[in-house]
């Protein structure tokens, strides 16, 4: 996925991400800026989910 497209999608989804995963701070969400690997890592750290589960959860938001 193109970096600009990823950042654009991230901006569209930040509100939903913050609502669904309240353990993520505003700063953490802003630092991710469409860097999905960072998102997956934070989900592993804060929620104990696998990278694949984090990927599925995020993809489900886009549906």
Image (cartoon, grey):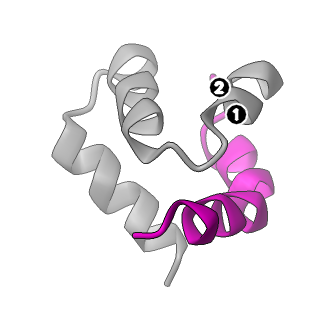
Instruction: Give 23 or 26, whichever is nearer the viewer.
Output: 26
The residue mark sitting in front, 2 or 1, is 1
The answer to which of 40 and 20 lies nearer the viewer is: 40
The residue at which mark 1 appears reads as 29
On residue 41, the disc is none
At x 65%, y 58%, the residue is 7
Q: Image check: 55 left or right of 10?
A: left
Residue 49 at x, y percent in the picture: 26, 31
* Earlier residue among tags 2 and 1: 2
* Residue at figure coordinates x 51%, y 43% from the top left: 35
Asked if labels 1 and 2 touch by Cβ distance under 8 angstroms, the answer is yes
Q: Position of residue 28 (x, y in %)?
A: 68, 23
Q: What percent of the width, then of the height, locates residue 39? A: 47, 36
* Residue 8, position as x, y percentages in the image: 70, 67
Residue at x 22% of width, y 38% of height: 51
Query: Which residue is most to the top?
Result: 45
Q: Which contiguous range is marked in magenta? A: 1-23
Asked if residue 5 lies in the magenta stretch, the reply is yes
Across the whole image, how many numbered discs are drawn on residues? 2
Q: Is residue 9 above or below residue 48?
A: below
């Amino acid at each position: 996925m193109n970096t600009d497209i990823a950042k654009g999608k991230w901006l569209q989804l930040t509100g939903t991400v913050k609502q669904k995963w309240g353990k993520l701070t505003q700063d953490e969400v802003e630092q991710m800026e469409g860097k999905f690997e960072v998102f997956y890592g934070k989900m592993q750290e804060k929620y104990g989910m696998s990278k694949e589960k984090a990927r599925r959860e995020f993809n489900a938001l886009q549906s």
